[in-house]
Image (cartoon, rainbow, N blue to C red):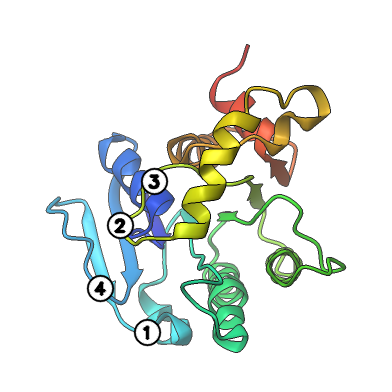
Amino acid sequence: MKTAIILGATGLTGGMVLELLLKNNSYNKVKWFGRSPVRIKNPKIEEHLGDLFHLDNFKKDFIADEVYCCIGTTKSKTPNKALYRKIDFGIPKNAAKLAKENGISTFTVISALGASIKSPIFYNRIKGEMEEAVLHYGIQRTYILQPSLIAGKRNEKRIGEWLFKQLMKVANLVLAGPLDKYKSIQPGTIAQCMVWLANNPYDRVRIESDEIRRIVSPK
């Protein structure tokens, strides 16, 4: 029986990871670290509420077999770039640091397609910096998922993202071959892939959107 840690379980993809782990008989405990409760009643859940900007405060409880880091924000939700960086870079980096210090051997984290420290796009550059920071700690089984636009309904309204998703529904019909990775992807697919990677051997660290789909639905 395993113990898992989730960061970002109140988000779209993180919530689906939580549901999968609660249904999976291989896990007897799922630790949730965040600012607010997940509002799901289940004896497997162990909540640790507090400020994720100070993850070191949770060090004695940050003990598990694997970590699922589903933290992420958007420009519209967090226009302040310094705060944006603290969330998308700082929290995953510090989570990887704690995982390494506490001997956790599996770390899965959501990044983004096009992430690169050399990217002129702020969002992609921050994700690239996050990836390098996570890899720095040398956790034995590290998996970085790089999805394209994540489809699905969110609780908050994001008009620009909604419009882009409508365009992507049309674009998905023509994107094929080397362009297949740019198709939008369902959050449930990402969640399934994260749990699969944590429970199966895999020889790649960075996993792009099309590969995420192939892992979940092999042909």
| Residue underneath mark 3 | 17
The residue type indicated by label 4 comes to Ser
Residue 120, given in percent of the width and then of the height, sits at 83, 69
How far apart are the two marked residues, 1 and 4, measured between alpha carbons? 10 Å
Circle 2 or circle 1, nearest the eye: 2
Report, in whole angstroms, how far the alpha carbon at label 2 lies from the one at label 1.
Answer: 22 Å
**Amino acid type at image mark 1:** Asp
Nearest to N terminus: mark 4 or mark 2: 4
Q: CA distance from mark 4 to mark 2?
A: 15 Å
> Tag 2: Cα neighbours inside 10 Å, few (<14), some, or many (≥20)?
few
Where disc 1 sits, the SS reads loop
- Sooner in the amino-acid sequence: mark 4 or mark 3: 3
Q: Which of label 3 and label 2 is nearer to you?
A: 2
Q: Which residue is mark 2?
A: 155
Q: Badge 1 is on which residue?
A: 51
Indicate which disc, 1 or 4, sits on the residue closer to the N terminus: 4
Farthest top residue in view = 219
Q: How many marks?
A: 4
Task: Say what secondary structure mark 2 lies in.
Answer: loop
For numbered disc 3, what is the local secondary structure?
Answer: helix
Q: Toward the viewer: 97 or 63?
A: 97
Between residues 145 and 125, which one lies in front from this camera angle? 125
Say whether residue 69 is visible. no
